[in-house]
Image (cartoon, rainbow, N blue to C red):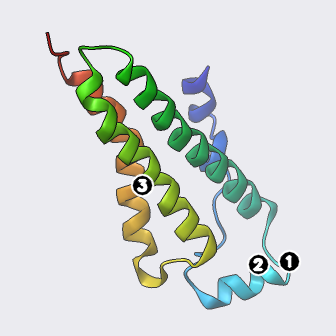
Amino acid sequence: MTTSLLRRGGGAEGARQDCSQADAACTAREAAGALSTHHWVHQYVSSTVFLVLAAALLVLSRALRANAGWAHLAPATRVAGLSALVVIAALVTVGLGGWSGLVQRAFVALLFGWPVLLSALPARR
């Protein structure tokens, strides 16, 4: 179902942003309500997905801690989840200016890459 939704342009990808929030003119247009519905859909869907993925890392760290073979990966997973929450808070509250694009790419790599890396690692015996 997810694959077919993505192929049809569902989710945040189907609703592109009108402009970057790192740009002062975009922030002014946003405050004036001059941006399209696609912009807002992108904002809300991507924010929700990022929060859910960050929370999932925290839940995953608890599950890893409960399993002896995977317990050694629980602290790093917890740090990844907490780091993701800090980045979300920074992007939403203060922004990161010209660095926001780079930080967002590293953030997405962490959110999607860490679980993939975990799946490739063997459990300790």
Separation of residues labelled 3 and 2 (CA atoms): 27 Å
Separation of residues labelled 3 and 1 (CA atoms): 31 Å
Classify residue 90 as left or right of residue 17. Answer: left
Crowding at mark 1 (Cα within 10 Å: few <14, some 14-19, many 20+)? few
Q: Closer to us: mark 3 or mark 1? A: 3
Classify residue 1 as left or right of residue 125. Answer: right
- SS at badge 1: loop
Question: Which residue corresponds to mark 3?
Answer: 83
- SS at badge 2: helix
- Residue 20: image quadrant is bottom right
Residue 104: % across, % down: 44, 62
Residue at the image point whose x is 78% and y is 73% from the top: 35
Classify residue 43 as left or right of residue 98. Answer: right
Q: Closer to us: mark 3 or mark 2? A: 3
Q: Nearer the viewer, residue 87 or 61?
A: 61
Question: Which residue corresponds to mark 2?
Answer: 30
Question: Which residue corresponds to mark 1?
Answer: 33
Residue 57: % across, % down: 46, 36
Q: Are marks 3 and 1 in contact (CB under 8 Å)?
A: no
Q: Nearer the viewer, residue 116 or 23?
A: 116
Residue at the image point whose x is 39% and y is 66% from the top: 103
- SS at badge 3: helix
Q: Is residue 33 above or below residue 73?
A: below
Report the quarter where the N terminus lies.
top right
